[in-house]
Image (spheres, grey):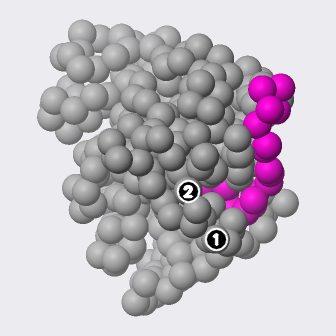
Amino acid sequence: MDQELLMARCLQLARLGKGRTLTNPMVGALLVHEGKIIGEGFHSAYGADHGEIEAFKSVTKEDQERIAYSTLYVNLEPCCYHGKTPPCADEIIRRGIKKVVVGTPDPNPKVNGMGIERLKAHGVDVRFPVLEAECRALNRFFFTNMQKQRPFILLKFACSKDSYIGNYHRAVPISNAWSRYIVHKVRHEVDGILIGTRTALNDNPRLTNRFYYGKSPVRIVMDRYGKIPADFHLFSDGQPTWLFTESPAIRPTPVRVFAWEKELQKMMDVLMQEGIGSLLVEGGAYTLQSFIDLGLWDEIWVTQSGLVLGSGVKAPKFTGNLVNEFHLRQDKLSIYKPL
């Protein structure tokens, strides 16, 4: 069977874990015996078994003896160290697998080619890379975590046709229902969502995922001087909120209070240490511009509608490489990456 087709199936399986693996990568795996897939698995949640192990567990009793004569396909290099689970490389060796096809090496310094070398040292024929660009794109959050030692940062804002993101003192609906659906889908996929004080005061937002299946992200609020009222949704609806402030007034659980960090990079260090591997920044303009000015971003999503406001808060200014564009009825979603 075609290697790229089988690797594409690994990626398809891996996506089933999207939004649930936290700082772990999304991994899908297949066991193929004489052209037939006898086992499939994926990493379903942070702390759960990895894709390779799930693939082994899925094999029927009748096909167990075929495992040692099968080829294992996996989109990311098998791990070789003890974390929350034992090393997948050791289990592959124990199972007697003689051939493994890998999509891309693992950038984690604890792996970074050592998983492949361990397999080779035990006589396993390892072939790689296959669909490497696609494998890296799927786990772009994880690659950023490992290579930059910070969360993957996605900046998002909606603006009018004349490039305003709203009024100064109240929320203004700009994007349509389809655009909001896409935003809530992204909320399911990321670990955290961040806003500043002004956006919280103007919009009293919930920042939860209500239009798409799955989880809501951890809400992260920068409120240096403690201006946000305690009865706002962020503090009163029972959903998790993390607050960075210099004024740690008594807050109801599940609000976690962190010391104010003047430097955004230090705040990102704290979030990374707390398990936030991907961050959606929804504003406001000052907060977004602060990230942009520091070059502290990996993607910017701009939704532009046909609405004309005439005045208000200007959209953030940035320079980026347009990598994708979608039309959602009268809205246009443009996705940028750093130059």
Mark 1 lies on a secondary structure that is loop
- Residue at image mark 1: 1
Q: Is residue 254 left or right of residue 13?
A: left
Residue at mark 1 to residue at mark 2: CA–CA distance: 9 Å
The residue drawn where x is 51% and y is 46% is 66
Describe residue 4's horizontal placement relative to residue 307 as left or right. Answer: right
Q: In the picture, residue 8 is in which quadrant?
A: bottom right
Camera-nearest residue between 258 and 286: 258
The three-letter code of the residue at mark 1 reads Met
Picture layout, residue 270 above or below residue 70: above
Place of residue 153 in the rendered image (x, y in percent of width and height, measured from the top left): 61, 44
User: Which quadrant: the N terminus?
Assistant: bottom right
Which label was assigned to residue 47? none
Q: Toward which corner of the image does residue 177 lie, by quadrant?
A: bottom left
In the depicted structure, whether residue 196 falls above or below residue 162: above
Looking at the image, can residue 187 be seen?
no
Q: Can you give x and y, in whole percent of width and height, for residue 40 in the image?
A: 44, 51
**Range of magenta residues:** 120-138
Viewed as shown, does residue 307 lie left or right of 293?
A: left
Q: Position of residue 175 (x, y in %)?
A: 38, 74
**SS assignment at label 2:** strand
Residue named by callout 2 = 32
Q: Position of residue 164 (x, y in %)?
A: 52, 70
**Which amino acid type corresponds to the residue marked 2 in the rendered image?**
Val
Front residue of this view, candidates 247 and 256: 256
Tell me the residue at 40%/53% (across/down). 16
